[in-house]
Amino acid sequence: MSFTYNRTVRFQDTDAAGVVYFANVLGICHEAYEESLEASSINLKDFFTNPSVAFPIVHASVDFLRPMFVGDKLLISLIPQKIGVEKFEITYEVTVAEVVVAKAITRHVCIDASSRSKQELPDEIVQWLETNRRDAEGAERRRSREIM
């Protein structure tokens, strides 16, 4: 199945209208991304402070389908997918009580931290991508059988 992350909306996540501030949805999605890396035994400190390689986000988008409020229990599902030898994309689905409230995408490129030039994804990230993608595809097949 896709990786899932549970999170409660906090007051600090909201704006003056009492709903989650739009930019904070990407922050919440990034929390899920970090948790998925850690669940795959990737050391976060090494991953984010490695002086030789970096994974900047080069594209991000969010579709807001329903508002999210303080106290809402979010379930963030993410599916990473390799889209080239040096890049990957993560799709996120944010639900509250089994209702999809937002969908997001982040696209990441692997670069050499010194030269800032693109480079191939390291093996541990390729493995993370393959494992999470395979798990998500298996869950989708199981769901489609349940519907029949």
Image: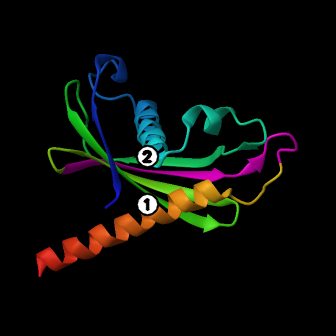
Looking at the image, do the residues carrying marks 2 and 1 touch, with CB atoms under 8 Å apart?
yes
Disc 2 element: helix
Q: Residue at x 21, y 76 (%)?
A: 144
Residue 22: percent from left, percent from top: 41, 33
Q: Residue at x 20, y 34 (%)?
A: 73
Residue 97: percent from left, percent from top: 14, 44
Task: Confirm whether the magenta stretch covers residue 101.
Answer: yes
Residue type, mark 1 in image: Asn
Residue at the disc numbered 2: 36
Magenta range: 99-116
Q: Earlier in the sequence, mark 2 or mark 1?
A: 2
Residue 24: percent from left, percent from top: 42, 30
Q: Quadrant of the N terminus?
A: bottom left
Residue 132: percent from left, percent from top: 43, 60
Task: Confirm whether the magenta stretch covers residue 81.
Answer: no
Instruction: Count neighbours of disc 1 (C-alpha within 10 A) and say few if under 14, some if 14 to 19, many if 20 or more.
Output: many
Q: Quadrant of the C terminus?
A: bottom left
State whether residue 23 is above or below residue 65.
above
Residue at the disc numbered 1: 132
- Judged by its main secondary structure, the magenta piece is strand
Extreme residue in the bottom direction = 148
Residue type, mark 2 in image: Ser
Q: Quadrant of residue 12?
A: top left
Question: In the rendered view, does 51 fall on the left or right side of 10?
Answer: right
